[in-house]
Image (cartoon, rainbow, N blue to C red):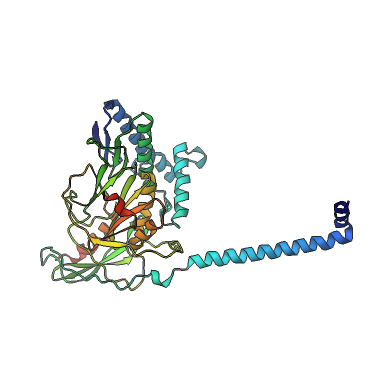
Amino acid sequence: MRLQKRFICLYHPMVYNHSMKKIIISSALVIAIAAYVIYQHVTGQATVPAAQNTAPNPQTTTSTPAASGEYKDGTYTGSVADAYYGSLQVQAVVKGGALADVVFLQYPSDAGHTIELSRSSMPVLKSEAIQAQSANVNIISGATQTSEAFQKSLAAALALAKN
Amino acid sequence: MKETRIIMGMPVTVHIVDASARAADLEKIFEYFRSVDEQFSAFKRTSELSRINDGTLAEKDYSPEMKEIMKLSEETRRLTNGYFNIRKPNGAIDTSGLVKGWAIHHAAKMLKEAGFKNYFVDAGGDIQVAGKNEEGKPWSVGIKDPFDETQQKIVKVVYLKHGEGIATSGTYIRGQHIYNPHDADNKPITDIVSITVIGQNIYEADRFATPAFAMGKKGISFIENIDGLEGYMIDASGIATFTSGFEKYLK
């Protein structure tokens, strides 16, 4: 009995208009809040934490065992090569007649995306110097392809450096 | 029974330990890889992939396998925030980053359905194992030394006991150690030479090994964050970094 009364009241023209308005406004509010939350969530994830970027690289340049005098000392810029994910360009640094360093001038960009890392704290991963293993194994896993783009660009740079 | 053929431009090895294996069983697998090559080779003008890139094949006419690869590629693209992308800057499609693992996985399934229990399929250094080796022990896999010009030395040994897949993505620089101390621009610079991924199967390992390599030193963190994957990354100075669960594969 009571339920029916409420039901009828809801559909009385005067009551109906007010209720609809309320429903529309509350829905709009809920949608707006949801959109805002989603927006924050998305933009929050899109930023790269500053700590992500690399610490000073402790590696030093090294001279290579290439025959001295093969190349003229200096810095040579290679051609731009098409790598899998974009353009790649290297610069060869020659010291003492040998290739001393390779600098990446262009590297396939991540197209504006960042890596999504989980929010939980990252364990520090362990490292070790690689060591030759003498064990016999059933199968060997390795990359069969060299980075053609890298090779191409470096070869172009070294061609310029040739004596 | 074991045999190696060159297909898709790389050595494909099929090894079936079970005594019931016959030459015809291996032949079926090689035939399958040839058919994959016919469909997906970027070097064959007549391949389905080439016809898509030529613009002579409409999407509605894609084969079921091509449709599946497209679907899986899109899924992987989203999972890796675009680090995996079959569409190259010039607009062409290159499916090689995903097809290899997918094909090896399918080939291994064919062997399983044929009733074999102990085998492996290796295409260009990406491997799917099942069961045990000829000695009845877990399959042992060596990770190649990225600095060895002869490409024969290994730097790590892992044992796969639960039908895992293992894939290695890398750049092997011939003859020289290349260092890059110039990181000031914060550009995503790859100073790693290889990353090996072990996954529940070769399809999972392979599709994440490619983008992980493109992420440079961050790639190993990317693998760390994916459930079911372990990784071993080697940088240009010969230092390896590995995921927190990787050591379970060492024996």
Q: Is A31 situated left or right of B119 in this image?
A: right
Q: Nearer the viewer, residue B222 or A104?
A: B222
Q: Would you say residue B68 is visible in this rendering?
A: yes
> What percent of the width, then of the height, locates residue A60?
22, 71
Quadrant of residue B165 within the rendered picture: top left
Is any part of residue B56 visible from this angle? no
Q: Is residue B124 left or right of residue A42?
A: left
Furthest residue toward front: A1
Q: Which quadrant: the N terminus of chain B?
A: top left
How many marks the image carries: the answer is 0
Residue at left offset 42%, top offset 41%: B51
Residue A97's place in the image compared with B209, above or below, is below
Where residue B233 sits, quadrant-wise, is bottom left
State the residue in front, B54 or A127: A127
Q: Nearer the viewer, residue B156 or B144?
A: B156
Residue B166: percent from the left, percent from the top?
32, 47
Residue ID at (26%, 41%): B139
- Residue A39's x, y, as percent? 57, 65
> Percent position (x, y) of residue B161?
31, 43
